[in-house]
Image (tube, helix red, strand yellow):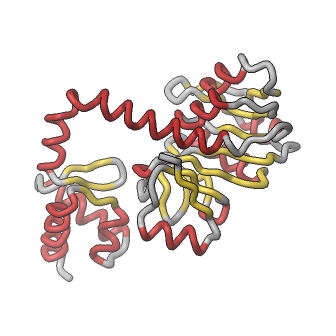
Amino acid sequence: MYQEERLVKIVSELKKRGKLSNQDVCQLLDVSRDTARRDIIRLVEEGNAVRTHGGIASTFLMSELEKYKESGFNERKERASREKRMIAKKAASLLKDKDLCFFDVSTTIASLSTLVTKKIAVYTHSLDNAEILAKKEFVDFHLLGGRFNQENRFFYDLFTIKSQLEDVYFDYAFIGAAGLTEDGVYFVDKEDARIKKEAIKRAKRVYVLTDYEKFNKTSYYKSAGLADIDVVITNEFPPENLRECFLSNHIQVELTDS
């Protein structure tokens, strides 16, 4: 298929769906990532699409999003917060006294921290989790040290990985996600991803807490393949392609109650 034909096909699909991930383009055209990337670059350069995080969107969709961005922001924020709280509530129901857990850096995991009522031990590199859990006298709380990442509010250095985690084996690791694809779980910060990767290796069961919007989204750094995950807690059934991957990797999907 010539590039012009591929571009027409992408634009036609964008009109139907509004946006496409990079992976969607690959599947739509049955081409490699490099070919899809070249097609996407040309579409964007010619003004027929705009780049989004992990893909492209139609120019009409983006103009409408900008138009309503301000008026709908608080509503979307509150809806997202409700979804995160429900996911966190589901995760909190799993906790038992004497559990040893790793709590990741994410707003959903911070919500989980607020819901902890059991006498558990928690390791985390998140400042937000620390501020919440330090007030719970019944929690045996451990803050992983290192340099502070101001933007995403976590601590990190090589000593954390090599020393502070090497003798720990968790009952549960609760992980968020910037993106979850057929390839695995991805995050924005390289250092953050490395700590999660080590914690995942040292956990009996790994729970990924994520809302539907993160499915089929990519980010920069991979922490885990699907084979490393035991359970995904989310607010809606994952897309069909991920459901098939979850099934083949024996990943259990648990939905929130509402």
Report whether 213 appears left or right of 125. Answer: left
Look at the picture and state if 119 lies above or below 102: above
Look at the picture and state if 142 lies above or below 25: above
Observer-nearest of 199 and 230: 230
Numbered circles on residues, count: 0
Q: Position of residue 43 (x, y in %)?
A: 17, 59
Observer-nearest of 202 and 69: 69
Quadrant of image for the N terminus: bottom left
Seen at 60% across and 50% down, the residue is 208
Seen at 44% across and 70% down, the residue is 241
Seen at 44% across and 33% down, the residue is 81
Report which quarter residue 119 is drawn in. Answer: top right
Q: Position of residue 27 (x, y in %)?
A: 34, 73
Q: Position of residue 83 (x, y in %)?
A: 46, 40
Report which quarter residue 78 is drawn in. Answer: top left
Residue 219 visible, this orientation: no
The residue at the far bottom in this view is: 1
Observer-nearest of 240 and 37: 240
Q: Position of residue 48 (x, y in %)?
A: 12, 56
